[in-house]
Amino acid sequence: MSDVLELADVTLRRGSKTILDGVGWSVSDGERWVVLGPNGAGKTTVLQMAAGRLFPSEGTVRVLGDRLGAVDTSELRTRIGLASAALADRIPGHERVLDVVLTASYGVTGRWRESYDDYDTSRARDLLAAFGVEQLTDRNFGSLSEGERKRVQIARALMTDPELLLLDEPAAGLDLGGREELMAALGEIATDRRSPVIVLVTHHVEEIPAGFTHGLLLRDGRVEATGPLEEVLTPQHLSRAFGLDLEVERHRGRWSARAAGRAG
Ligand SMILES: Nc1ncnc2c1ncn2[C@@H]1O[C@H](COP(=O)(O)OP(=O)(O)OP(=O)(O)O)[C@@H](O)[C@H]1O
C-alpha cells in the first residue's frame, strides 16, 4: 500500500453529476506528481481530496496513512501544504506578506492574536527569500502582482514543513518570465530529496517543472493514464484526454505539446 496518498475506486457525485468516476491513484514517498487534464476533468477535485477537504461518495481515500472519514482532518491538514486560488481568495488584501506566510502555522489566513517566535519569523523570511520575494516582506498581499502572489502562496504552503505539498495551477496567470522563474524554483524543490512529496495540478505539459517523476492524466472524471511521466505523457494518452491529435516532445527535462501535423 502506498504511504502518502491512496485513492481506491473513488467516485464523487454532486446532484446528478458524477465528478469523479472510479478513480484509482497511489502516491509514494519521494515522488513528484503532476495531475493533468482538460477543463472540468476533475483535477482540482482530486487535489481537494488529497488535501482532506473533500470526501468521496464511494471508495476510499487515504492521506498520509489516515483514511478520510475515520480521522480528524483538522490535525491531518496541518501536515499538508496547499496553494490554490480558492485559498488565496481568502487572504485579506491588507495582510502583510510576512504574515501571509507566518499564519500558515495556525492554519489561518488573517493575523489576529496568535504569537510567533523568532524561529517562525526567520523561517518565513527564508522561504520568501527562497522564492525571490524577500523584498516584498512588508508589502500588502493585495498590492502584489499575480506572479508575486503565487510565490508567496508557495512559501506559505511550505511554512509548516509539510509532508505533502499540493499546488493547484501555480503557473496560471503568469507571464513567460514569471512562469519560467517559478518553474526554476519548483524544479529546485522537486530535485531536493529533503522536499515533501509534491502534487501539482496543471492544464499544460509546459508547466511541469524539471524533477517531476509521475503523472495522473484525467478525462471526464476518469483516469486516462497514471504512472511514470514518460509512460503517461505519450501522444496517444494526451490526444485522447484533450480530444485532439497531439505531438509531444521532451527537451532538457521539460515537456511541450502541440497539435500534430500543423506547420510552424
Ligand atoms: N459542487 C459541484 N456541483 C456540481 N458540479 C461540480 C461541483 N464542483 C465541481 N463540479 C464540476 O465537476 C467538474 C470537475 O471540476 P474540477 O474543478 O475538479 O475540474 P478541473 O479539472 O480542475 O477543471 P479546470 O481545469 O477547469 O480548473 C466540472 O465540470 C465542475 O463544473
Image (tube, helix red, strand yellow):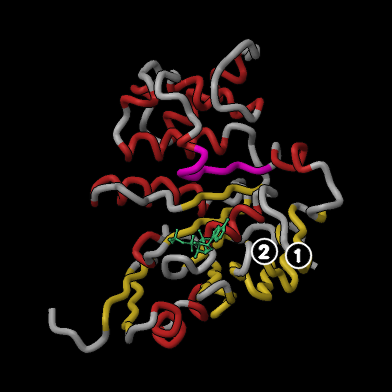
Q: Residue at x 55, y 62 (%)?
A: 33
Q: Residue at x 57, y 53 (%)?
A: 198
- Relative to residue 191, is residue 243 depicted above or below? below
In percent of width and height, residue 118 lies at 60, 13
Which residue carries the number 2 mark? 27
Q: Cβ–Cβ below 8 Å for labels 1 and 2?
A: yes
In percent of width and height, residue 213 lies at 53, 66
Pick the front one: 198 or 194: 198
Which residue carries the number 1 mark? 2
Q: Is mark 1 within 8 Å of ligand 1?
A: no
**Amino acid on which disc 1 is placed:** Ser
Q: Residue at x 39, y 16 (%)?
A: 138
- The reply, left or right, for residue 128 in relation to residue 147 is right
The region drawn magenta spans 80-87
**Amino acid on which disc 2 is placed:** Val
Asked which secondary structure carries label 2, the reply is: strand
* Residue 206 visible in image: yes
In percent of width and height, residue 194 lies at 61, 46
* Residue 187 visible in image: no
Where on the picture, by quarter, is residue 245? Answer: bottom left
- Relative to residue 37, is residue 263 depicted above or below? below
- The reply, left or right, for residue 192 in relation to residue 182 is right
* Mark 1–mark 2 distance (CA, rounded to whole Å): 6 Å
Q: Which mark is residue 242?
A: none
Disc with the residue nearer the chain's start (1 vs 2): 1
